[in-house]
Structure formats: C-alpha cells, structure tokens
Image (cartoon, rainbow, N blue to C red):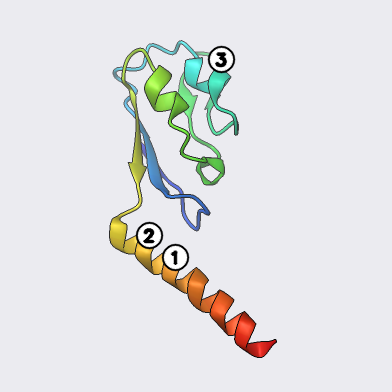
Amino acid sequence: MSTKASQSRNRIDSILINQEWCKRCGICVAFCPKHVFEDDEEGTVSVPRPEDCIYCELCERLCPDLAITLVPQAQDAQAQEEGAHAKTAQDAGAQA
C-alpha cells in the first residue's frame, strides 16, 4: 500500500493509502496541486507520481476517512541530503 518517493526533491518518503478506509470520494485526486494521485473507473486511488509530491498535506488534511498518511523522510536522511547539497555548492564555489 505504500509508494516510495525515491530520489525525491522533497522531504517525503512515502504516501500510504489505506484502501480499506478509503471510500473513493476523489477529494485527494481533485485537490492535489501536483496531480500525484489518480483514480480508476471504480474510484480506487493510486499514487503514480510520488516524486511530484510537494508535501503540502492537502490530501492528508482533506481526506474525510483519514485514509492518507504522508511519511516524511527520516531526519538522518534529510541531514545527509542537505549536507550533500551544501558540499556540492561549496565545491562549485571553490572551482570558480
């Protein structure tokens, strides 16, 4: 039920949809500003584009069934990612 947002530019690790709780209302599909969600003809929701998630939390907050959970990256993964970006920027500045 989870979808990994691998190599994402955001701070989300996965988007979980509890299909047992979901009543297939389509609110998440309709309100997601980045069109991360899709539904099929029965209304079953999937997450085909997790890498586009900007962690605005609209889906999680608007879901009337509390069926969506956004799982943030672990703090150590965030620190490593931010450290790598800072190191790259420092290296670029030193080469100039």
Residue lying furthest bottom: 95
Q: Is residue 32 left or right of residue 19?
A: right
Q: Nearer the viewer's eye, disc 3 or disc 2?
A: 2
Q: Amino acid at mark 2?
A: Gln
Q: CA distance from mark 3 to mark 1?
A: 41 Å
Res. 51 visible in picture: yes
- Relative vertical location of residue 32 with respect to residue 70 in this rendering, above or below: above
Residue toward you, 23 or 51 = 51
The secondary structure type at the circle numbered 3 is: loop
The residue depicted at 49 percent of the width and 21 percent of the height is 28
Q: Residue 41 — which label?
A: 3
Name the residue: 56% across, 43% down.
Answer: 52
Q: Which residue is mark 2?
A: 78
Q: Position of residue 48 (x, y in %)?
A: 54, 37
The quadrant holding residue 22 is top left
Find out whether the residues at labels 3 and 1 contact each other: C-beta distance under 8 Å: no
Q: Which mark is residue 82?
A: 1
The three-letter code of the residue at mark 3 reads Glu
> Percent from the top left, x then y, of residue 69?
33, 32
Residue at 35% of width from left, 46% of height from top?
72
